[in-house]
Amino acid sequence: MQLEQLKDLVVEVLEDMKAREITVMDVRGKTSVTDYMIVASGTSDRHVKAIAETVAYKAKEAGEPPLGVEGVEVGEWALVDLNGVVVHLMLPKVRDFYSLERLWNAPSLVARSAAGAPA
């Protein structure tokens, strides 16, 4: 699977799972860890866990098993490492605290979904 297809698959799963404020950041040239970081919010610990597990399952089903899945035990912040795409799923208060979008600079922002975005 091509990197862009994997990124699109993740975004599609996030939208299907009703994740909020989906942000895709192109971090190529800023880190060697990954090419894309995707950040999204869940509405509860259970929602964050379910989204992370579904992203991991759908990626594996598409032939891209995750290198790792972290944080699903607690659910405030989960990470799914798909090598070229790293997915951060957080509760809104945790997301506000860490502000990953600001950390990685908004100019590299590729897309942000309107679902759940402030008006």
Image (cartoon, rainbow, N blue to C red):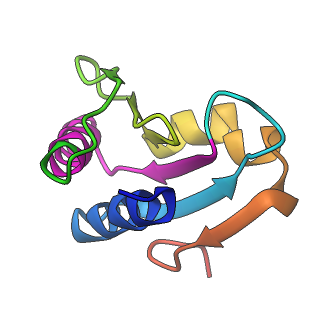
Image quadrant in which the N terminus is located = bottom left
Q: Is residue 4 depicted above or below 55 in this figure? A: below
Q: Residue at x 42, y 62 (%)?
A: 20
- The residue lying toward the viewer, choosing from 25 and 95, is 25
Q: Main secondary structure of the magenta part?
A: helix
- The residue lying toward the viewer, choosing from 86 and 4, is 4
Q: Residue at x 30, y 32 (%)?
A: 66
Residue 117 image point, x, y percent: 55, 73
Q: Is residue 42 depicted above or below 112 in this figure? A: above
Residue 10 image point, x, y percent: 36, 58
- The residue lying toward the viewer, choosing from 44 and 21, is 21
Q: Is residue 96 depicted above or below 23 in this figure? A: above
As drawn, is 42 to the left or to the right of 51?
right
Q: Is residue 24 depicted above or below 48 in this figure? A: below
Q: Residue at x 46, y 72 (%)?
A: 116
Residue 58 magenta-highlighted? yes
Q: Which residues are magenta?
A: 35-59
Label count reads: 0
Q: Residue at x 83, y 42 (%)?
A: 29
As drawn, is 16 to the left or to the right of 98?
left
Judged from this view, the residue extending furthest toward the front is 1
- The residue lying toward the viewer, choosing from 27 and 44, is 27
Image quadrant in which the C terminus is located = bottom right
As drawn, is 51 to the left or to the right of 31?
left
The image quadrant that residue 112 belongs to is bottom right
The image quadrant that residue 34 belongs to is top right
Residue 45 image point, x, y percent: 27, 35
Residue 39 image point, x, y percent: 53, 49
